[in-house]
Amino acid sequence: MSKSAFLNAIEAYMLTRRYSLRTIKTYQYWIKAFIIFHGKAHPDSMGRDEIEAFLTYLAVNRKVSSSTQALALNALMFLYNKYLEKPIEDMNEFKRAKRKRKMPVVLTQDEVKLLLSNMHGVHRLMASILYGSGLRNIELLRLRVNDIDHDHLQVRIWNGKGFKHRVSTLAPELLPAINRQIKHVQTLLEEDLASDEFAGVWLPDALSRKYKNANKELGWQYLFPSVRLSIEPGTTNIRRHHLDETNINKAIRKAKINAGIRKQVTSHTLRHSFATHLLQKGADIRTVQTQLGHADVKTTEIYTHVLKQGAHGVRSPLSDLFVE
């Protein structure tokens, strides 16, 4: 089924309200799946019972994870509570997907060093910040020049997961590379400002109203800008966005292969490694929780399991056979 007029209208609605392109794509996917599941019935003719039936189907038949089911639920709550303005309440009569806790893949410090040695230029800097500050991929890409606090060696993260703000540590060894990157951003900005069509970098509505010229100031530009200008979706504004998420993922995958690392390595692996290595060095778990931006310390506790040697910290009797 090609994208319908209904889905196009939802996209336009979300664009005007500054939802991210990733959120728009995700919500459209689940709304479309919901409509198809119910024989292409219009959502306006359905409600709570149909939503619960769909969520149960996802858990029982498709056996999706709890996080995937939660995404589908969020998309449908947006559809009814905001777009259709038909509030849905008491969503409890559906089969919830079982939460499967997976142990995170963690690199040793030697493996991180080897991975970074196989990266160069901006990609090496990006991967170094992911590991050195424990950022999520999208948090890294959304960094502005102003978010680097040189004096206090901090990275400011605005509207992270759950729309929460936080600060994380910044390795001083990265400052020379960061300063070179800022000079690159400044060069691009000077080129962009030479064009009358350049509308400046995108800013949230509240900031753009408060700081009228901020969108053309260096401090508000993305630290990792796209290589080319583009038209802002839903408008005619020509802007320079940040790099695409796939950019750093491809670079990490290539470096992992060149380094001969057998583990599955993604940008999130560097975040896992950051947390585990902090705990290894004696950092308090609450401190690590704050650095990662976890709402619940139980989420952070998964890394304490990684630190245990063997199964649940039990020493294998075979090891005693090799003691001289």
Image (tube, rainbow, N blue to C red):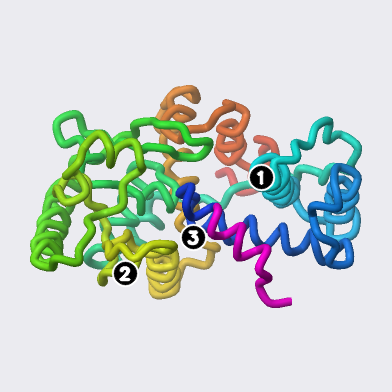
Which residue is pictured at 19% across the width and 66% down the height? 197
| Element class at badge 2 | strand
| Element class at badge 1 | helix
At label 2, counting other C-alpha atoms closer than 10 Å, the crowd grade (few under 14, some 14-19, many 20 or more) is some
Residue 78: numbered disc: 1
Q: Does the magenta stretch include residue 8?
A: yes
Which quadrant is the C terminus positioned in?
top right
What x and y, as percent, mark residue 167?
34, 31
Residue sitting at the far bottom: 2
* 265 relative to 157, above or below: below
| Element class at badge 3 | loop
| Earlier sequence position, callout 3 versus callout 1 | 1
Q: Is residue 307 left or right of residue 5?
A: left
Which one is in front, 154 or 319?
Answer: 154
* 2 relative to 241, above or below: below
**Residue stretch in magenta:** 1-13
Between marks 2 and 1, how big is the CA–CA gap? Answer: 28 Å
Residue 230: numbered disc: 2
Q: In the image, which is nearer the foreground, mark 3 or mark 1?
A: 1
Which residue is pictured at 58% across the width and 61% down the height? 25
Which one is in front, 304 or 137?
Answer: 137
Amino acid type at circle 1 is: Phe
* 282 relative to 195, above or below: above
Q: Quarter of the image holding residue 39?
A: bottom right
Between marks 2 and 3, how big is the CA–CA gap? Answer: 27 Å
Q: Does the magenta stretch include residue 110?
A: no
Which one is in front, 101 or 97?
Answer: 97
Which one is in front, 38 or 126?
Answer: 38
Which residue is pictured at 20% across the width and 63% down the height? 198
Q: Is residue 235 visible?
A: yes
Q: Mark 3 points at which residue?
A: 266
| Earlier sequence position, callout 2 versus callout 3 | 2
